[in-house]
């Protein structure tokens, strides 16, 4: 069964690279969805009910933590696994994310596509 992964990131080039890599590296196991700010991310999650969300922290309109709080506030969003990706090593946001049930953190400059695929596979088992 195909799993839906929602990538929420305002960096359209990074998002495309990530989405293409997940589609290719996942060997057809994943349907990749995209949103480019927090509001669109929430709306897409509400409509599509993804199996996993990759969520950037720093975005326009609504930041990642605010988006995650909104998702967690909905019955359908309480248990969706979330991996936060950021360019920051923001300890305060990481603490908030842990409290909101974030399953993983990826600092954008510090991971490979293989790393993220491995994390996704582990979470979606």
Image: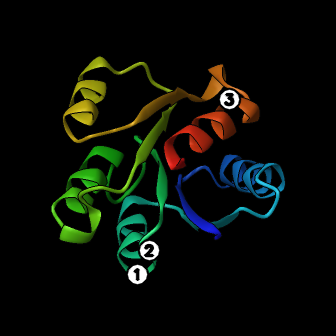
Tell me if residue 33 can be seen.
no
* Direction from residue 74 to residue 1 in the image, left or right: right
Task: Tell me the residue that label 1 is attached to.
Answer: 47
Contact, mark 2 vs mark 1 (Cβ under 8 Å): yes
Q: Secondary structure at mark 2?
A: helix
Q: Quadrant of residue 111?
A: top right
- Tell me residue 17's x, y (percent): 76, 49
Q: Secondary structure at mark 1?
A: helix
In the image as oriented, which residue stretches furthest toward the bottom?
47
Q: Residue at x 34, y 60 (%)?
A: 61
Placement of 123 over or under 47, stated as above or below: above
Q: Which image quarter is the N terminus in?
A: bottom right
Placement of 5 over or under 107, stated as above or below: below
Placement of 48 over or under 20, stated as above or below: below
Color scheme of the displayed model: rainbow
Q: Nearer the viewer, mark 2 or mark 3?
A: 3
Q: Residues within 10 Å of mark 3 (few under 14, many from 20)?
A: few
Q: Residue at x 73, y 56 (%)?
A: 16
Q: Residue at x 66, y 34 (%)?
A: 118
Does label 3 or label 1 sit earlier along the sequence? 1
Q: Nearer the viewer, residue 111 or 51?
A: 51
The mark found on residue 115 in the picture is 3
Q: Secondary structure at mark 3?
A: helix
Does label 2 or label 3 sit earlier along the sequence? 2
């Amino acid at each position: 069964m195909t799993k839906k992964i929602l990538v929420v990131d305002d960096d359209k080039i990074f998002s495309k690279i990530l989405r293409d890599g997940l589609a290719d590296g996942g060997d057809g196991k994943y349907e990749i969805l995209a949103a480019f700010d927090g509001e669109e991310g929430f709306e897409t999650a509400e409509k599509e009910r993804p199996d996993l969300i990759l969520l950037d922290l720093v975005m326009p309109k609504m930041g990642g933590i605010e988006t995650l709080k909104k998702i967690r506030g909905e019955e359908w969003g309480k248990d969706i696994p979330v991996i936060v990706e950021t360019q920051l090593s923001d300890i305060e946001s990481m603490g908030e994310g842990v409290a909101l049930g974030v399953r993983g953190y990826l600092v954008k400059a510090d991971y490979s596509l293989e790393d993220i695929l491995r994390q996704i596979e582990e979470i979606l088992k």
